[in-house]
Image: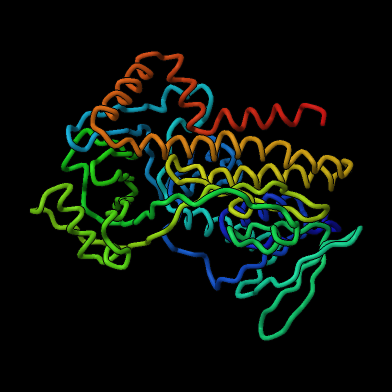
């Protein structure tokens, strides 16, 4: 299959997943990335059950498990009273080999994929390289690459943009990227402070209602990730100062506690979906195609699912299927991302915006009733664990266009 070739723009977890899936099948792959090395910036850290299932045949899931923290339960809590509901993913044990979430930094995945990719004779990674122009003809696609103070044009059968929210490949496709930006900023913080020592019944993933803004606590190996929202009356440059964040944590958990912060990263949250994911020989995947609220941890997972779906469709085409098989990619993934990822993440965000304690308790009562009904709980966890979305994608592939 080495006569076939694909250029992947972007060496994040989505681009590397796509590239490795193709290279394993013998496709010649060139990955182009502007950064000099794998990013260690605070990003996604939740791996859902079907993602772990998909990566297992490659040997990557074992590496993630060795460096991550298995999280079989997650919670929604009321900070003021300690009332909570706990969702136990073991109910999915007959649907997945990994009935839990795994908390592991996405850089672990990227490093593992890159190491494997570099061992593939049909693959190469160009780092510190900028993609300028992108185009195509009837029989080829191409990118213009700037690196080492020179400009070079390289051709391939297809070009895939896994190059994030400001994707140059999406611009070349000419698709809309409609949506909105949530009004709230998120402050992502890491600390070695052991929150489980304060609340012994705390789960590994927790979404917590609190009067001065909801927050979340995620437990990674030896580390906790805390997502806070700045106070409405405080300028962002003040809110991101370490001493200010420590003061916020002490107001939540007690002034007697010491919080040594490791990293701080503020970011805005978007809800956007590209109207087209393919134009001829050009494709987009991951954040280049869709952005969603991170509550629920579905963004990176959805991008990985895009990459695996597209790699399978491309390989099928390279093995002799008509180019129309590539239409399955958008048909399978776009509706699922729209409804099961962006839609679910938006509902998760709205749920955590409830302001009054009475509203929160009423919603908590609904969730407690859900947990008491095994059939409803099973359906809910299949949906929030992304199993239903992937099943729907498989069904869409089977429906004639």
**Residue lying at 30% horizontally and 25% vertically, measured from the top left:** 364
Q: Position of residue 362 (x, y in %)?
A: 29, 23
Q: Is residue 8 left or right of residue 112?
A: right
Q: Position of residue 288 (x, y in %)?
A: 62, 55
Q: Is residue 98 above or below residue 169?
A: above
Q: Which of the 4 image quadrants contains residue 144?
A: bottom right
Q: Is residue 264 left or right of residue 119?
A: left
Q: Position of residue 386 (x, y in %)?
A: 53, 33
Q: Quadrant of the C terminus?
A: top right
Residue at the far left: name it. Answer: 256
Residue at the far front: name it. Answer: 233
Q: What colouring does the structure picture have?
A: rainbow
Q: Is residue 32 above or below residue 379?
A: below
Q: Is residue 317 left or right of residue 263?
A: right
**Residue lying at 17% horizontally and 43% vertically, measured from the top left:** 197
Residue at the far bottom: name it. Answer: 149
**Residue lying at 83% horizontally and 52% vertically, measured from the top left:** 280
Q: Which of the 4 image quadrants contains residue 6?
A: bottom right
Query: Disc count in the image?
Result: 0
**Viewer-proximal residue, 93 or 276?**
276
Q: Is residue 221 left or right of residue 162?
A: left
**Viewer-proximal residue, 347 or 106?**
347
Q: Position of residue 278 (x, y in %)?
A: 76, 50
- The answer, for residue 51, to whether it is visible in the render is yes
Q: Is residue 171 above or below residue 366?
A: below
Q: Which of the 4 image quadrants contains residue 140?
A: bottom right
- The answer, for residue 122, to whether it is visible in the render is no
């Amino acid at each position: 299959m080495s006569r076939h070739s694909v250029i992947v723009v972007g060496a994040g977890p989505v681009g590397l997943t796509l590239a490795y899936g193709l290279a394993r099948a013998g496709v010649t792959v060139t990955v182009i990335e502007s950064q000099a090395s794998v990013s260690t910036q605070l990003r996604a850290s939740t791996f859902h059950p079907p993602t772990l299932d998909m990566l297992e045949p490659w040997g990557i899931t074992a590496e993630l498990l060795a460096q991550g923290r298995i999280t079989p339960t997650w919670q929604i809590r009321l900070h003021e009273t300690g009332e909570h509901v706990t969702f136990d993913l073991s109910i999915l044990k007959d649907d997945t080999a990994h009935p839990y979430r795994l908390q592991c930094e996405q850089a672990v995945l990227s490093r593992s994929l890159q190491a494997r990719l570099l061992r593939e004779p049909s693959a190469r990674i160009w780092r510190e390289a900028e993609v300028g122009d992108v185009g195509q003809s009837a029989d080829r696609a191409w990118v213009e690459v700037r690196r080492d103070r020179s400009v070079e044009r390289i051709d391939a059968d297809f070009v895939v943009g896994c190059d994030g929210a400001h994707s140059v490949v999406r611009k070349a496709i000419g698709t809309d990227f409609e949506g909105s930006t949530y009004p709230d900023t998120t402050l992502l913080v890491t600390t070695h402070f052991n929150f489980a020592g304060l609340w012994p019944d705390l789960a590994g993933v927790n979404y917590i209602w609190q009067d001065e803004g909801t927050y979340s606590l995620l437990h990674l190996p030896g580390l906790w990730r805390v997502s806070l929202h700045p106070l409405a009356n405080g300028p962002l440059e003040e809110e991101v100062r370490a001493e200010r964040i420590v003061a916020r944590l002490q107001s939540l958990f007690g002034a007697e506690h010491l919080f040594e912060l490791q990293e701080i990263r503020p970011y805005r949250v978007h809800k956007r979906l590209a109207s087209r994911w393919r134009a001829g020989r050009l494709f987009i995947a991951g954040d280049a195609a869709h952005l969603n609220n991170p509550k629920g941890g579905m963004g990176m997972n959805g991008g990985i699912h895009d990459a695996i779906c597209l790699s399978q469709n491309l390989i099928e085409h390279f093995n002799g299927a008509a180019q129309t098989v590539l239409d399955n990619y958008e048909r399978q993934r776009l509706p699922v991302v729209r409804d099961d990822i962006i839609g679910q993440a938006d509902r998760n965000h709205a749920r955590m915006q409830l302001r009054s304690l009475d509203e929160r308790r009423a919603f908590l009562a609904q969730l407690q009733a859900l947990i008491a009904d095994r059939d409803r709980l099973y359906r809910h966890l299949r949906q929030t664990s992304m199993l239903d979305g992937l099943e729907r994608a498989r069904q869409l592939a089977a429906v004639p266009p």
